[in-house]
Image: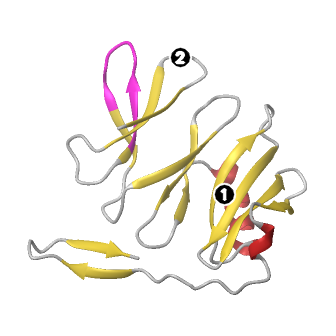
Amino acid sequence: MRLWTFDASGKHLHMLSCIEQDKSALVQIDWSTGEQKVVFGSQRADVTDAIFNARTFEPEAVCIDPARQEWSALTPAVAAELALIKARLPGHAFHVQSQTDDDRRWIVMSYTAEQPATYHLLDRDRQTLTELFTARPELKPYRLAPMHASRAARATGSRSFHI
């Protein structure tokens, strides 16, 4: 389990949970009744990350990683931003590290096996993604080795990923 956040009303807790399911899912718990609702789950992989609205603290997107990161918009409000990041940073995994209080600007950290973490400013109003800095600039001149995910069958019949 991983606790993420209460919504702005303080009525609902959002967290990752794999209780009563094979993969971890984003769940919402009503704090007064204890009722649990799965907001997003996948049979292919665990939920690994989420983007929450900076004002309401409601989940707007979730990520699974079945060998390569896949983001899904839970609301149309962030679909354009996810598409912009995917188009501008093809093949990159990313995480939203920070958001302004009005939720109009995000700090996005992206990376690949071949490139060190790079930080970007996403301006949601202008639909721009501007590189800010690289965490390890001394690695930029070097060609780093790629990693490839492979799927292997276990004796139990289940599958696992190996990098």
Left or right, 142 with respect to 41, comes to: right
- At label 1, the amino acid type is Ala
Left or right, 90 with respect to 9, comes to: right
**Residue under numbered circle 2:** 10
Labels in figure, total:
2
**Residue 29 at what x, y percent from top left?**
38, 27
Quarter of the image where one finds residue 131: bottom right
**Residue 106 at what x, y percent from top left?**
77, 47
**Which residue: 56% across, 25% down?**
7
**Which residue: 72% across, 73% down?**
89
**Residue 32 at what x, y percent from top left?**
38, 12
Image quarter of the C terminus: bottom left
Nearer-the-camera pick, 28 or 134: 134
Q: Is residue 32 above or below residue 155?
A: above
Left or right, 75 with respect to 151, comes to: right
- At label 2, the amino acid type is Gly
Does the magenta portion include 54? no
Neighbor class of circle 1 (other Cα within 10 Å; few <14, some 14-19, many 20+) is: some
Nearer-the-camera pick, 158 or 59: 158
**Which residue: 85% across, 59% down?**
127
Of labels 1 and 2, earlier in sequence is 2
**Residue under numbered circle 1:** 79
Q: Residue furthest top?
A: 32
Mark 1 element type: helix
Residue numbers of the magenta segment: 26-36
